[in-house]
Image: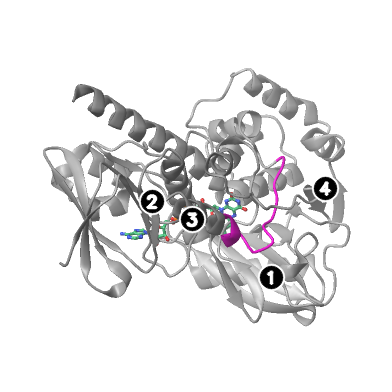
Amino acid sequence: MTDTLKFDAIVIGAGAGGCHAAARLAAAGQHTLLVDDHDYLGGRAGTEIIDGHRVNIGAIALEPGGAFEDTFELCGAKLDIREPSPAAVFFIDRKVVDVRKGGLGFLLNGLTKQASRVLDQFAKARTGNMPDGRESTEDWLQRYTKNETVHAVFRNLCAAIFAMNSNEIPARAFLTYFTQKGAFKRFGFHPEGTMGAWTALAGAVERLGGEVWLSSPAEKIEVSGGRARAVLIRRNGGDVVRVEARTIIFNGGPKALVGLVGEDALGADYVRQTAEILKPSANIVFNFASREDLMPGVPGIMTFGKTKHGRLCNMANLTATCPEIAPEGWHQYVGYAVPHPAIGDFDSDAEVALSHEDLRDQFPGFDDKVKMLSIRVMRDDWPAQRTGAGYDMDVATPVAGLWCVGDAVKDYGNGGTQACAVSARIAVDAALDAQAAAAQAG
Ligand SMILES: Cc1cc2nc3c(=O)[nH]c(=O)nc-3n(C[C@H](O)[C@H](O)[C@H](O)COP(=O)(O)OP(=O)(O)OC[C@H]3O[C@@H](n4cnc5c(N)ncnc54)[C@H](O)[C@@H]3O)c2cc1C
Protein backbone atom coordinates (compact mmCIF):
# COMPACT_ATOMS: atom_id res chain seq x y z
CA MET A 1 0.00 0.00 0.00
CA THR A 2 1.50 3.34 -0.99
CA ASP A 3 -0.89 6.23 -0.49
CA THR A 4 -4.13 7.40 1.05
CA LEU A 5 -6.04 9.79 -1.17
CA LYS A 6 -9.25 11.68 -0.46
CA PHE A 7 -12.21 12.30 -2.75
CA ASP A 8 -15.79 13.32 -1.95
CA ALA A 9 -17.15 10.37 -3.94
CA ILE A 10 -15.85 7.16 -5.49
CA VAL A 11 -17.75 5.30 -8.20
CA ILE A 12 -16.54 1.72 -8.72
CA GLY A 13 -17.34 0.57 -12.25
CA ALA A 14 -17.64 2.69 -15.40
CA GLY A 15 -20.61 0.88 -16.91
CA ALA A 16 -23.73 2.81 -17.88
CA GLY A 17 -24.88 3.24 -14.27
CA GLY A 18 -21.40 4.14 -13.00
CA CYS A 19 -20.76 6.74 -15.71
CA HIS A 20 -24.15 8.36 -15.07
CA ALA A 21 -23.52 8.37 -11.31
CA ALA A 22 -20.01 9.84 -11.60
CA ALA A 23 -21.17 12.55 -14.03
CA ARG A 24 -24.06 13.51 -11.75
CA LEU A 25 -21.79 13.65 -8.68
CA ALA A 26 -19.21 15.76 -10.52
CA ALA A 27 -21.96 18.06 -11.78
CA ALA A 28 -23.10 18.51 -8.16
CA GLY A 29 -19.61 19.78 -7.27
CA GLN A 30 -18.33 16.53 -5.75
CA HIS A 31 -14.65 15.75 -6.21
CA THR A 32 -15.26 12.39 -7.88
CA LEU A 33 -13.13 9.35 -8.69
CA LEU A 34 -14.45 6.86 -11.29
CA VAL A 35 -12.59 3.53 -11.53
CA ASP A 36 -13.03 0.43 -13.66
CA ASP A 37 -11.15 -2.85 -13.86
CA HIS A 38 -11.31 -2.94 -17.69
CA ASP A 39 -9.12 -0.82 -19.96
CA TYR A 40 -12.20 0.67 -21.62
CA LEU A 41 -15.31 2.57 -20.52
CA GLY A 42 -18.86 1.28 -20.66
CA GLY A 43 -18.67 -2.27 -19.26
CA ARG A 44 -21.33 -4.34 -21.05
CA ALA A 45 -22.24 -1.27 -23.10
CA GLY A 46 -18.69 -0.76 -24.36
CA THR A 47 -17.45 -0.93 -27.96
CA GLU A 48 -14.58 -2.93 -29.46
CA ILE A 49 -12.86 -2.70 -32.84
CA ILE A 50 -13.00 -5.86 -34.98
CA ASP A 51 -11.50 -5.84 -38.47
CA GLY A 52 -11.98 -2.06 -38.69
CA HIS A 53 -15.63 -2.22 -37.54
CA ARG A 54 -16.88 -0.61 -34.32
CA VAL A 55 -18.71 -3.45 -32.63
CA ASN A 56 -20.90 -2.87 -29.58
CA ILE A 57 -20.67 -5.41 -26.78
CA GLY A 58 -24.16 -4.73 -25.43
CA ALA A 59 -26.41 -1.69 -25.76
CA ILE A 60 -26.85 -0.07 -29.16
CA ALA A 61 -30.10 1.86 -28.82
CA LEU A 62 -29.87 4.84 -26.47
CA GLU A 63 -33.08 6.55 -25.40
CA PRO A 64 -33.11 10.34 -25.32
CA GLY A 65 -35.14 12.02 -22.61
CA GLY A 66 -35.61 10.91 -19.01
CA ALA A 67 -32.76 10.48 -16.55
CA PHE A 68 -30.43 9.48 -19.40
CA GLU A 69 -30.48 12.79 -21.27
CA ASP A 70 -30.81 14.71 -17.99
CA THR A 71 -27.33 13.50 -16.90
CA PHE A 72 -25.78 14.86 -20.09
CA GLU A 73 -27.46 18.23 -19.57
CA LEU A 74 -26.42 18.40 -15.91
CA CYS A 75 -22.73 17.79 -16.60
CA GLY A 76 -22.55 19.64 -19.94
CA ALA A 77 -21.69 16.58 -22.04
CA LYS A 78 -22.87 16.15 -25.62
CA LEU A 79 -25.37 13.36 -26.27
CA ASP A 80 -24.50 12.62 -29.88
CA ILE A 81 -27.04 10.08 -31.04
CA ARG A 82 -28.75 9.70 -34.38
CA GLU A 83 -32.38 8.65 -34.40
CA PRO A 84 -33.48 6.41 -37.28
CA SER A 85 -36.84 6.95 -38.93
CA PRO A 86 -38.78 4.75 -38.81
CA ALA A 87 -37.17 3.72 -35.53
CA ALA A 88 -38.85 0.34 -35.23
CA VAL A 89 -40.62 -2.01 -37.63
CA PHE A 90 -41.73 -5.64 -37.53
CA PHE A 91 -40.56 -8.37 -39.93
CA ILE A 92 -43.41 -10.84 -40.31
CA ASP A 93 -43.22 -13.67 -42.87
CA ARG A 94 -40.16 -11.93 -44.38
CA LYS A 95 -42.14 -8.72 -44.97
CA VAL A 96 -41.51 -5.38 -43.28
CA VAL A 97 -44.51 -4.01 -41.37
CA ASP A 98 -44.17 -0.29 -40.69
CA VAL A 99 -46.25 0.62 -37.63
CA ARG A 100 -45.52 4.34 -37.58
CA LYS A 101 -49.14 5.30 -38.05
CA GLY A 102 -50.99 2.81 -35.84
CA GLY A 103 -48.38 1.35 -33.48
CA LEU A 104 -48.81 -2.11 -31.96
CA GLY A 105 -52.59 -1.84 -32.50
CA PHE A 106 -52.09 -1.61 -36.25
CA LEU A 107 -49.89 -4.72 -36.20
CA LEU A 108 -52.23 -6.76 -33.99
CA ASN A 109 -55.31 -5.81 -36.02
CA GLY A 110 -53.56 -7.22 -39.07
CA LEU A 111 -52.80 -10.50 -37.29
CA THR A 112 -55.87 -11.45 -35.26
CA LYS A 113 -59.55 -10.74 -34.80
CA GLN A 114 -58.90 -10.68 -31.03
CA ALA A 115 -56.64 -7.63 -31.24
CA SER A 116 -59.11 -5.42 -29.37
CA ARG A 117 -59.13 -7.83 -26.39
CA VAL A 118 -55.35 -7.46 -26.06
CA LEU A 119 -55.38 -3.71 -26.67
CA ASP A 120 -58.08 -3.26 -23.99
CA GLN A 121 -55.62 -4.71 -21.49
CA PHE A 122 -53.02 -2.12 -22.50
CA ALA A 123 -55.65 0.60 -21.97
CA LYS A 124 -56.43 -0.83 -18.52
CA ALA A 125 -52.72 -0.98 -17.67
CA ARG A 126 -52.40 2.70 -18.57
CA THR A 127 -54.87 3.49 -15.79
CA GLY A 128 -52.88 1.35 -13.34
CA ASN A 129 -55.07 -1.76 -13.62
CA MET A 130 -52.39 -4.45 -13.92
CA PRO A 131 -52.14 -8.22 -13.47
CA ASP A 132 -50.35 -9.25 -10.28
CA GLY A 133 -46.59 -9.67 -10.37
CA ARG A 134 -46.70 -13.48 -10.59
CA GLU A 135 -48.46 -14.13 -13.89
CA SER A 136 -46.08 -14.41 -16.86
CA THR A 137 -46.59 -12.35 -20.02
CA GLU A 138 -47.23 -15.56 -21.97
CA ASP A 139 -49.97 -16.74 -19.57
CA TRP A 140 -51.52 -13.27 -19.50
CA LEU A 141 -51.58 -13.07 -23.32
CA GLN A 142 -52.99 -16.59 -23.58
CA ARG A 143 -56.12 -15.33 -21.82
CA TYR A 144 -56.88 -12.99 -24.74
CA THR A 145 -55.53 -14.72 -27.86
CA LYS A 146 -54.08 -18.03 -28.99
CA ASN A 147 -52.76 -16.58 -32.25
CA GLU A 148 -49.24 -18.00 -32.73
CA THR A 149 -47.82 -15.02 -34.59
CA VAL A 150 -49.08 -12.64 -31.91
CA HIS A 151 -47.44 -14.85 -29.27
CA ALA A 152 -44.22 -14.86 -31.28
CA VAL A 153 -44.27 -11.05 -31.57
CA PHE A 154 -44.80 -10.64 -27.82
CA ARG A 155 -42.08 -13.20 -27.07
CA ASN A 156 -39.69 -11.31 -29.32
CA LEU A 157 -40.56 -7.95 -27.73
CA CYS A 158 -39.84 -9.48 -24.31
CA ALA A 159 -36.60 -10.96 -25.63
CA ALA A 160 -35.47 -7.82 -27.47
CA ILE A 161 -36.11 -5.40 -24.62
CA PHE A 162 -35.64 -7.47 -21.48
CA ALA A 163 -33.57 -10.46 -22.68
CA MET A 164 -36.27 -12.73 -21.24
CA ASN A 165 -38.75 -15.11 -22.82
CA SER A 166 -42.44 -14.24 -22.47
CA ASN A 167 -42.89 -17.13 -20.00
CA GLU A 168 -40.14 -15.61 -17.81
CA ILE A 169 -41.10 -11.95 -17.46
CA PRO A 170 -44.10 -11.01 -15.30
CA ALA A 171 -46.92 -9.44 -17.35
CA ARG A 172 -46.98 -6.66 -14.78
CA ALA A 173 -43.34 -5.71 -15.54
CA PHE A 174 -43.93 -5.97 -19.32
CA LEU A 175 -47.04 -3.76 -19.17
CA THR A 176 -45.38 -1.29 -16.80
CA TYR A 177 -42.63 -0.82 -19.35
CA PHE A 178 -44.95 -0.39 -22.32
CA THR A 179 -47.45 1.88 -20.63
CA GLN A 180 -45.34 3.91 -18.20
CA LYS A 181 -41.69 3.92 -19.37
CA GLY A 182 -39.93 5.07 -22.53
CA ALA A 183 -40.46 1.69 -24.27
CA PHE A 184 -37.86 2.66 -26.88
CA LYS A 185 -40.43 4.76 -28.75
CA ARG A 186 -37.49 7.04 -29.50
CA PHE A 187 -33.87 5.94 -29.60
CA GLY A 188 -30.65 6.67 -31.43
CA PHE A 189 -27.31 5.05 -32.27
CA HIS A 190 -24.00 6.68 -31.39
CA PRO A 191 -21.67 7.36 -34.35
CA GLU A 192 -18.60 6.33 -32.30
CA GLY A 193 -20.35 3.17 -31.12
CA THR A 194 -22.17 3.17 -27.77
CA MET A 195 -18.83 3.79 -26.07
CA GLY A 196 -19.08 7.39 -27.33
CA ALA A 197 -21.76 8.12 -24.73
CA TRP A 198 -19.51 6.97 -21.86
CA THR A 199 -16.47 8.81 -23.24
CA ALA A 200 -18.57 12.00 -23.14
CA LEU A 201 -19.68 11.43 -19.53
CA ALA A 202 -16.20 10.42 -18.30
CA GLY A 203 -14.78 13.47 -20.09
CA ALA A 204 -17.22 15.66 -18.18
CA VAL A 205 -16.14 14.06 -14.87
CA GLU A 206 -12.53 15.05 -15.63
CA ARG A 207 -13.47 18.50 -16.88
CA LEU A 208 -15.35 19.09 -13.61
CA GLY A 209 -12.22 18.27 -11.58
CA GLY A 210 -12.64 14.53 -11.08
CA GLU A 211 -10.44 11.60 -12.13
CA VAL A 212 -11.02 8.44 -14.16
CA TRP A 213 -8.78 5.39 -13.58
CA LEU A 214 -9.10 2.45 -15.97
CA SER A 215 -7.50 -1.00 -15.49
CA SER A 216 -7.90 -0.34 -11.76
CA PRO A 217 -9.91 -2.95 -9.84
CA ALA A 218 -11.35 -2.05 -6.46
CA GLU A 219 -10.29 -4.88 -4.16
CA LYS A 220 -12.02 -3.99 -0.91
CA ILE A 221 -14.49 -1.50 0.53
CA GLU A 222 -13.63 -0.67 4.13
CA VAL A 223 -16.61 -0.42 6.47
CA SER A 224 -16.50 0.58 10.12
CA GLY A 225 -19.26 1.59 12.50
CA GLY A 226 -21.86 0.69 9.84
CA ARG A 227 -20.46 3.26 7.36
CA ALA A 228 -18.37 2.83 4.19
CA ARG A 229 -15.12 4.74 4.65
CA ALA A 230 -12.62 3.92 1.93
CA VAL A 231 -11.81 1.73 -1.08
CA LEU A 232 -8.60 -0.18 -1.76
CA ILE A 233 -7.84 0.14 -5.46
CA ARG A 234 -5.06 -1.54 -7.42
CA ARG A 235 -4.24 1.41 -9.63
CA ASN A 236 -3.35 0.46 -13.20
CA GLY A 237 -2.10 -2.99 -12.22
CA GLY A 238 0.45 -1.49 -9.81
CA ASP A 239 0.29 -0.65 -6.12
CA VAL A 240 -2.86 -0.64 -4.02
CA VAL A 241 -4.05 2.87 -3.20
CA ARG A 242 -6.39 3.57 -0.29
CA VAL A 243 -8.99 6.18 -1.22
CA GLU A 244 -11.31 7.70 1.38
CA ALA A 245 -14.70 9.17 0.48
CA ARG A 246 -18.01 10.06 2.10
CA THR A 247 -19.95 8.51 -0.78
CA ILE A 248 -19.18 5.17 -2.44
CA ILE A 249 -21.22 3.88 -5.36
CA PHE A 250 -20.79 0.38 -6.79
CA ASN A 251 -21.73 -0.56 -10.38
CA GLY A 252 -20.88 -4.28 -10.36
CA GLY A 253 -24.20 -5.46 -8.86
CA PRO A 254 -25.18 -6.41 -5.28
CA LYS A 255 -23.84 -9.96 -5.62
CA ALA A 256 -20.29 -8.79 -6.35
CA LEU A 257 -20.66 -6.13 -3.66
CA VAL A 258 -20.79 -8.89 -1.04
CA GLY A 259 -17.27 -9.95 -2.08
CA LEU A 260 -15.94 -6.40 -1.69
CA VAL A 261 -17.63 -5.49 1.58
CA GLY A 262 -18.04 -8.82 3.37
CA GLU A 263 -21.16 -10.63 4.57
CA ASP A 264 -20.91 -9.32 8.14
CA ALA A 265 -21.11 -5.66 7.17
CA LEU A 266 -23.97 -6.14 4.69
CA GLY A 267 -25.96 -8.47 6.91
CA ALA A 268 -27.57 -11.85 6.34
CA ASP A 269 -30.79 -10.43 4.85
CA TYR A 270 -28.97 -8.52 2.11
CA VAL A 271 -26.82 -11.54 1.27
CA ARG A 272 -29.93 -13.73 1.13
CA GLN A 273 -31.58 -11.25 -1.27
CA THR A 274 -28.64 -11.46 -3.68
CA ALA A 275 -29.15 -15.24 -3.84
CA GLU A 276 -32.96 -15.32 -3.92
CA ILE A 277 -34.11 -12.22 -5.81
CA LEU A 278 -31.56 -11.66 -8.58
CA LYS A 279 -32.12 -13.62 -11.81
CA PRO A 280 -29.48 -12.79 -14.46
CA SER A 281 -30.81 -13.09 -18.00
CA ALA A 282 -28.89 -14.08 -21.12
CA ASN A 283 -28.79 -13.24 -24.80
CA ILE A 284 -26.76 -14.14 -27.88
CA VAL A 285 -25.34 -11.42 -30.10
CA PHE A 286 -24.39 -11.78 -33.76
CA ASN A 287 -22.43 -8.84 -35.15
CA PHE A 288 -22.00 -9.05 -38.89
CA ALA A 289 -21.41 -6.97 -42.00
CA SER A 290 -22.44 -7.32 -45.61
CA ARG A 291 -21.68 -5.66 -48.92
CA GLU A 292 -25.38 -6.05 -49.66
CA ASP A 293 -28.11 -4.03 -47.93
CA LEU A 294 -29.94 -6.73 -45.93
CA MET A 295 -32.51 -4.33 -44.45
CA PRO A 296 -33.49 -2.02 -47.31
CA GLY A 297 -35.73 0.82 -46.14
CA VAL A 298 -35.23 -0.14 -42.48
CA PRO A 299 -32.71 2.20 -40.84
CA GLY A 300 -33.49 1.22 -37.22
CA ILE A 301 -34.49 -2.00 -35.48
CA MET A 302 -36.82 -4.71 -36.69
CA THR A 303 -38.53 -7.21 -34.42
CA PHE A 304 -39.28 -10.62 -35.89
CA GLY A 305 -42.54 -12.54 -35.84
CA LYS A 306 -42.40 -16.36 -35.93
CA THR A 307 -38.90 -17.73 -36.54
CA LYS A 308 -37.85 -21.32 -37.22
CA HIS A 309 -36.59 -22.06 -33.70
CA GLY A 310 -38.03 -19.12 -31.76
CA ARG A 311 -34.61 -17.79 -30.71
CA LEU A 312 -33.88 -14.79 -32.95
CA CYS A 313 -35.80 -11.75 -31.70
CA ASN A 314 -34.61 -8.55 -33.37
CA MET A 315 -31.96 -7.03 -35.59
CA ALA A 316 -30.56 -3.53 -36.07
CA ASN A 317 -29.19 -1.72 -39.08
CA LEU A 318 -26.36 0.39 -37.68
CA THR A 319 -24.75 1.87 -40.77
CA ALA A 320 -27.93 3.41 -42.21
CA THR A 321 -27.60 6.22 -39.65
CA CYS A 322 -23.93 5.79 -38.62
CA PRO A 323 -21.92 4.74 -41.69
CA GLU A 324 -18.65 5.69 -39.97
CA ILE A 325 -18.76 2.65 -37.67
CA ALA A 326 -17.84 0.36 -40.63
CA PRO A 327 -15.12 0.54 -43.27
CA GLU A 328 -16.39 2.05 -46.51
CA GLY A 329 -18.66 -0.16 -48.59
CA TRP A 330 -19.92 -2.27 -45.67
CA HIS A 331 -23.39 -2.38 -44.12
CA GLN A 332 -23.19 -3.37 -40.46
CA TYR A 333 -25.85 -5.18 -38.47
CA VAL A 334 -26.43 -6.78 -35.12
CA GLY A 335 -28.88 -9.63 -34.59
CA TYR A 336 -30.06 -10.68 -31.14
CA ALA A 337 -31.36 -14.02 -29.97
CA VAL A 338 -32.51 -15.12 -26.54
CA PRO A 339 -31.93 -18.71 -25.40
CA HIS A 340 -34.45 -21.09 -23.85
CA PRO A 341 -34.35 -20.48 -20.95
CA ALA A 342 -32.88 -16.98 -20.70
CA ILE A 343 -32.89 -17.23 -16.92
CA GLY A 344 -31.06 -20.29 -15.63
CA ASP A 345 -28.76 -22.80 -17.27
CA PHE A 346 -28.68 -23.61 -20.99
CA ASP A 347 -26.37 -25.20 -23.53
CA SER A 348 -24.57 -22.23 -25.13
CA ASP A 349 -23.34 -24.08 -28.23
CA ALA A 350 -26.76 -25.56 -28.98
CA GLU A 351 -28.51 -22.20 -28.47
CA VAL A 352 -26.01 -20.39 -30.71
CA ALA A 353 -26.57 -23.02 -33.42
CA LEU A 354 -30.37 -22.66 -33.26
CA SER A 355 -30.16 -18.85 -33.28
CA HIS A 356 -27.77 -18.95 -36.25
CA GLU A 357 -30.24 -21.15 -38.11
CA ASP A 358 -33.01 -18.64 -37.40
CA LEU A 359 -30.88 -15.95 -39.08
CA ARG A 360 -30.18 -18.17 -42.08
CA ASP A 361 -33.88 -18.93 -42.38
CA GLN A 362 -34.91 -15.26 -42.31
CA PHE A 363 -32.22 -14.22 -44.81
CA PRO A 364 -31.79 -16.75 -47.62
CA GLY A 365 -28.13 -16.94 -48.67
CA PHE A 366 -27.07 -15.50 -45.27
CA ASP A 367 -23.71 -17.30 -45.07
CA ASP A 368 -22.65 -16.17 -48.54
CA LYS A 369 -23.68 -12.58 -47.93
CA VAL A 370 -22.17 -11.81 -44.54
CA LYS A 371 -18.82 -11.45 -42.84
CA MET A 372 -19.38 -12.56 -39.22
CA LEU A 373 -17.57 -10.18 -36.86
CA SER A 374 -18.44 -11.78 -33.54
CA ILE A 375 -20.84 -14.17 -31.87
CA ARG A 376 -21.07 -13.56 -28.16
CA VAL A 377 -23.13 -15.26 -25.48
CA MET A 378 -23.90 -12.84 -22.66
CA ARG A 379 -24.61 -14.86 -19.52
CA ASP A 380 -23.77 -15.56 -15.84
CA ASP A 381 -21.43 -12.85 -14.48
CA TRP A 382 -21.43 -10.92 -17.80
CA PRO A 383 -25.11 -11.19 -18.68
CA ALA A 384 -27.61 -9.31 -20.81
CA GLN A 385 -29.23 -7.99 -17.63
CA ARG A 386 -27.79 -8.60 -14.17
CA THR A 387 -31.35 -9.34 -13.21
CA GLY A 388 -34.48 -9.60 -15.31
CA ALA A 389 -37.16 -6.91 -15.08
CA GLY A 390 -39.40 -7.57 -12.10
CA TYR A 391 -36.58 -9.15 -10.04
CA ASP A 392 -34.57 -6.15 -8.87
CA MET A 393 -32.93 -5.20 -5.60
CA ASP A 394 -32.75 -1.73 -4.07
CA VAL A 395 -30.23 0.98 -4.90
CA ALA A 396 -29.73 1.46 -1.13
CA THR A 397 -27.58 -0.95 0.87
CA PRO A 398 -27.59 -1.58 4.65
CA VAL A 399 -24.22 0.25 4.88
CA ALA A 400 -24.34 4.05 5.28
CA GLY A 401 -22.61 5.96 2.50
CA LEU A 402 -22.82 2.99 0.08
CA TRP A 403 -25.20 2.54 -2.88
CA CYS A 404 -25.50 0.30 -5.94
CA VAL A 405 -26.29 1.42 -9.48
CA GLY A 406 -26.81 -0.51 -12.71
CA ASP A 407 -29.17 -3.08 -14.13
CA ALA A 408 -29.51 -5.22 -10.98
CA VAL A 409 -31.17 -2.30 -9.13
CA LYS A 410 -33.60 -1.03 -11.76
CA ASP A 411 -36.89 0.68 -10.97
CA TYR A 412 -39.80 -1.76 -11.44
CA GLY A 413 -40.44 -2.80 -15.04
CA ASN A 414 -37.60 -0.76 -16.51
CA GLY A 415 -34.68 -1.98 -18.64
CA GLY A 416 -31.38 -1.14 -20.29
CA THR A 417 -29.24 1.97 -20.05
CA GLN A 418 -32.19 4.28 -19.30
CA ALA A 419 -32.89 2.17 -16.19
CA CYS A 420 -29.19 2.38 -15.26
CA ALA A 421 -29.42 6.18 -15.53
CA VAL A 422 -32.51 6.18 -13.28
CA SER A 423 -30.62 4.08 -10.70
CA ALA A 424 -27.78 6.63 -10.81
CA ARG A 425 -30.18 9.52 -10.28
CA ILE A 426 -31.75 7.79 -7.25
CA ALA A 427 -28.37 6.85 -5.74
CA VAL A 428 -26.77 10.26 -6.26
CA ASP A 429 -29.79 12.15 -4.91
CA ALA A 430 -29.75 9.92 -1.81
CA ALA A 431 -25.98 10.38 -1.39
CA LEU A 432 -26.21 14.17 -1.64
CA ASP A 433 -29.14 14.23 0.82
CA ALA A 434 -27.14 12.07 3.25
CA GLN A 435 -24.13 14.39 2.97
CA ALA A 436 -26.33 17.45 3.55
CA ALA A 437 -27.98 15.82 6.60
CA ALA A 438 -24.57 14.90 8.03
CA ALA A 439 -23.29 18.45 7.49
CA GLN A 440 -26.35 19.86 9.26
CA ALA A 441 -25.93 17.47 12.17
CA GLY A 442 -22.37 18.85 12.50
C1 LIG B 1 -26.37 -7.76 -26.18
C2 LIG B 1 -27.00 -6.68 -25.39
C3 LIG B 1 -27.75 -5.71 -26.02
C4 LIG B 1 -28.30 -4.68 -25.28
N1 LIG B 1 -28.99 -3.71 -25.94
C5 LIG B 1 -29.40 -2.61 -25.26
C6 LIG B 1 -29.89 -1.50 -25.96
O1 LIG B 1 -29.97 -1.49 -27.20
N2 LIG B 1 -30.25 -0.41 -25.25
C7 LIG B 1 -30.11 -0.36 -23.89
O2 LIG B 1 -30.42 0.68 -23.30
N3 LIG B 1 -29.63 -1.41 -23.20
C8 LIG B 1 -29.25 -2.52 -23.85
N4 LIG B 1 -28.66 -3.56 -23.19
C9 LIG B 1 -28.53 -3.50 -21.73
C10 LIG B 1 -27.37 -2.62 -21.29
O3 LIG B 1 -26.24 -2.85 -22.10
C11 LIG B 1 -27.05 -2.94 -19.86
O4 LIG B 1 -28.22 -2.91 -19.07
C12 LIG B 1 -26.07 -1.92 -19.25
O5 LIG B 1 -24.98 -1.74 -20.12
C13 LIG B 1 -25.61 -2.41 -17.90
O6 LIG B 1 -24.84 -1.39 -17.30
P1 LIG B 1 -24.46 -1.40 -15.79
O7 LIG B 1 -24.56 0.00 -15.28
O8 LIG B 1 -25.22 -2.42 -15.03
O9 LIG B 1 -22.91 -1.71 -15.76
P2 LIG B 1 -21.99 -2.89 -16.35
O10 LIG B 1 -22.05 -2.90 -17.81
O11 LIG B 1 -22.19 -4.15 -15.61
O12 LIG B 1 -20.57 -2.29 -15.96
C14 LIG B 1 -20.04 -2.37 -14.66
C15 LIG B 1 -18.56 -2.13 -14.76
O13 LIG B 1 -18.01 -2.20 -13.44
C16 LIG B 1 -16.81 -2.93 -13.51
N5 LIG B 1 -16.49 -3.47 -12.19
C17 LIG B 1 -17.17 -4.43 -11.49
N6 LIG B 1 -16.54 -4.69 -10.34
C18 LIG B 1 -15.47 -3.87 -10.28
C19 LIG B 1 -14.44 -3.67 -9.33
N7 LIG B 1 -14.37 -4.38 -8.19
N8 LIG B 1 -13.48 -2.74 -9.61
C20 LIG B 1 -13.53 -2.00 -10.74
N9 LIG B 1 -14.49 -2.17 -11.69
C21 LIG B 1 -15.44 -3.09 -11.45
C22 LIG B 1 -17.13 -4.03 -14.53
O14 LIG B 1 -15.97 -4.67 -15.02
C23 LIG B 1 -17.83 -3.19 -15.58
O15 LIG B 1 -16.92 -2.60 -16.47
C24 LIG B 1 -28.11 -4.63 -23.89
C25 LIG B 1 -27.36 -5.59 -23.25
C26 LIG B 1 -26.79 -6.61 -23.98
C27 LIG B 1 -25.92 -7.60 -23.29
Question: Which residue position is annotated with label 3?
Answer: 202
Residue in the picture at 65% in, 22% down: 126
The x, y position of residue 392, in whole percent, is: 41, 39
State yes or no: residue 3 in magenta.
no
Q: Are marks 2 and 4 in contact (CB under 8 Å)?
A: no
Q: Is residue 262 left or right of residue 12?
A: left
Which numbered disc, 3 or 1, marks the residue closer to the eye?
3
Question: Which residue position is annotated with label 4?
Answer: 86
Q: Residues in magenta?
A: 185-197
Mark 1, Cα crowd under 10 Å, few <14 / some 14-19 / many 20+, is some
Task: Name which of mark 1 and mark 2 comes first in the sequence.
Answer: 2
Q: Within 8 Å: ligand 1 and the Cβ of disc 2?
A: yes
Question: Which residue position is annotated with label 1?
Answer: 357
Which numbered disc, 2 or 4, marks the residue closer to the eye?
2
The circle on residue 251 is 2
Q: Given the current orientation, which residue lies at the most extreme left position? A: 225
The residue type indicated by label 2 comes to Asn
The residue type indicated by label 4 comes to Pro
Task: Determine the CA span between mark 1 and mark 4.
Answer: 27 Å
Q: Is residue 85 visible?
A: yes
The residue type indicated by label 1 comes to Glu
